Amino acid sequence: MNDLPIFDAQQSGSDYVARARALAPMIAAAAPEIEAQRELTPQVVSALHQAGLFRLFVPRWLDGGEAPLSTYVQVIEAIARGDASTAWCLSQMNVCAISAMYLNPEAAREVLGKPGSALAWGSSSDCKAVRVPGGYRVSGTWDFGSGCHHATWLGAHCPVVGADGDPLKDEKGQPAERTLLVPKSAATVVDVWDVLGLRGTGSDRYVLNDVFVPDQFTITTLTRWPDAERLKQGIPYRFTASSLYASGFGSVALGNARGMLDSFIELATKKVARWTRNSLADNALVQAGVAEAYTKLESARIFMVQNLREVEETLLTQEAPTIHQRVRIRAAGTSAIRTATAVANHLYEMAGTTSIFADNLFQRRFRDAHTVSQHLQGRASHFENIGKHLLGKDVELRFI
């Protein structure tokens, strides 16, 4: 099924979207191998680098795209139509690349200025960064390191302690935290990614053991973004981390479900279900189901993209998104994940026994959908926060 033209093709960043759509068939063909290897293939990684798709949020002064968030989500959705694992890595690692905005130019060029460079990171509850002269000594383990297999640098979010092990305070009197960037060669990657879906992300654990990190390769943590310094920068850098992740992972979900819909339409024209004479495409329930799936996915996609464009337009004259705008971004992202999961469920059911075989893309798409849905960004509890705002109540800002 062809895309319906909705937006002006001359918009800023449309070239990145075109590149992503051109790569999607090749990525779809590589998806079974990505799934089997549990990491992106070298050919796919190389193609993404050549298209500049790992550098969407890298600033222009570092030869990056500094692309609008509305462009980023369209790129991620297009790649996910080929393979959700590839899109997930691309989504996560582009957000990581915003680190360049906090590094001095020399350090930024070392981390993200070289051909083929890419940054990945995960989360940890078992780590520390010991403050020492000139930097930190970091130890710990980080899980969910999506893309760590083809990253050149890794990030380590850490609480900061003194030489005596006691937590240090930042300038606001809060527990000090830093994100420390280290060459991937300094870490040990541990194979733990035995999961239901998104297997190709290779979101394994990595370990650092008393690694010295100079001050110039450390930044304020993701949870503290954006700060006053970044708000002076380009529009892509004025969004909160929650807005970036909600939009990116929501787009992975939409693209995965849309790829599943494309495959189902192809199947429906050929498959004749047992004890019937006509193809699935001649079944009235299937016809209605396809129309409903298409409409839900397109509605969710348009809400996300158009909303981001409206916010970007206001950022030409205001410093940062308003609380209401942030709530709308959260609503679009979480709704996209949950809508896409419901569509995937319906398509899986309509495909019948075709869906159940391990080597079938319907099963992979179904598993990927249900893995995306388990992420924090897809939690139904976000709607409570959205509802509070709409009803005039205070909201928890860390979730928007």
Image (cartoon, helix red, strand yellow):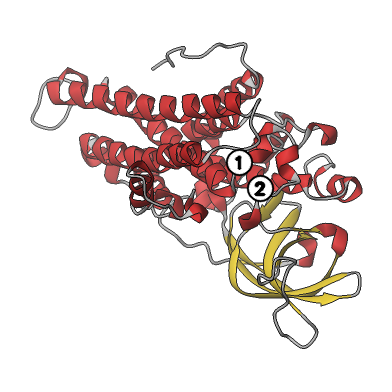
The answer to which of 284 and 166 lies nearer the viewer is 166
Residue drawn at point x = 41 percent, y = 52 percent: 394
Query: What residue did someone put label 1 on?
Result: 239
Occupied quadrant, residue 276: top left
Query: What residue did someone put label 2 on?
Result: 226
- Residue positioned most to the bottom: 164
Occupied quadrant, residue 320: top right
Q: Quadrant of the N terminus?
A: top left
- The reply to whether dot 1 and dot 2 touch (C-beta < 8 Å) is yes
Question: Does residue 341 appear in this view?
Answer: yes
**SS assignment at label 1:** loop
Query: Residue 276 vs residue 129: left or right?
Result: left
The answer to which of 50 and 323 lies nearer the viewer is 323
Residue drawn at point x = 14 percent, y = 20 percent: 278
Near mark 2 (Cα within 10 A), the count class, few <14, some 14-19 or many ≥20, is some
Q: Amino acid at mark 1?
A: Phe
The picture places residue 254, in percent across and down from the top left corner, at: 42, 35
Near mark 1 (Cα within 10 A), the count class, few <14, some 14-19 or many ≥20, is many
The picture places residue 378, in percent across and down from the top left corner, at: 40, 49
